[in-house]
Amino acid sequence: MSFKSESFSQAAQTVSKRMEARGFSCFYCEDKAAIAAKINELMPSGSSVTWGGSESLVEAGIIDMVHSRDYEVIDRKSASTPEEARALYGRIVCADYFLTSTNAFTLDGELVNVDGNGNRVACLISGPSHVIVVASMNKLCVNVGDAIRRIHTHAAPPNAIRVGANTPCSKTGICADCLSPDCICCQTVVTRKSRQPGRIIVILTGEPLGF
Ligand code: SF4
């Protein structure tokens, strides 16, 4: 194990205890293979599974894994009309499992997310029976303010490019605190506790994933 991996593992143990105190369940997975195995272990065959837009999930191979296993997959991108998208969203909020990442998390164990449409943070807050959050240790921040700064500085600009948003940051790489029609920073959500113990399952990982 490298010095960095050892440090991530130690920090994850510390932060996990603080997350557990907030009603989250926590696991630490060293790498992508362990993340996929843990998610597969957590979700029984036949469960309805959906996800929010997440580069971390794609990079970890989780979306491919879900498609290859015996799950009822609900893919919001399969809708071809606004009516279909709305009907699909009704199924998404009632899914057994919602997979997502978090834009950042804090030393005290809070999850911090910034979202455009808000569907990702809406499902994190309420709806799906279980939420599995994959969080790379490189998203660990000192506090909520630091997390929001990190998101606007390092996460949102590449994310805006990823989704083809016509925003200042997608042209310059730097947040301009915009109010553009395409702004991907409409909602800022701090999840400080899960009222239903264990509904939110956080998988911390030493694998560098996402933005
Ligand atoms: S420029 Fe707009 S969309 Fe880009 S990071 Fe800043 S607030 Fe978000």
Image (tube, grey):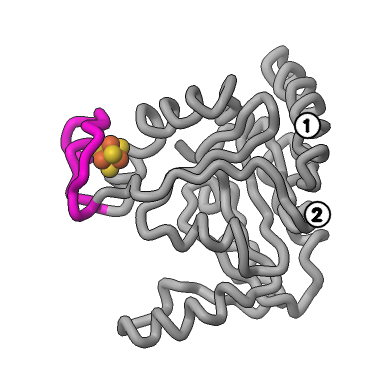
Residue depicted at x 73% and y 17%: 7
The verdict on residue 179 being magenta is yes
Residue depicted at x 82% and y 38%: 21
Helix, strand or loop for disc 2: loop
Magenta stretch: dominant SS? loop
Quarter of image, res 91: bottom right
The segment highlighted magenta reads: 164-182
Asked whether, in this view, residue 83 is left or right of residue 37, the answer is left
User: Where's ligand 1: which quadrant?
Assistant: top left
Q: Position of residue 129 (x, y in %)?
A: 71, 68
Q: Are marks 1 and 2 in contact (CB under 8 Å)?
A: no
Q: Which mark is residue 18?
A: 1
| Quadrant in the rendering for residue 102 | top right
Which of the numbered marks, if any, corresponds to residue 198? Answer: 2
- Answer yes or no: disc 1 within 8 Å of ligand 1: no
Q: Position of residue 15 (x, y in %)?
A: 75, 28
Q: Which mark is residue 70?
A: none
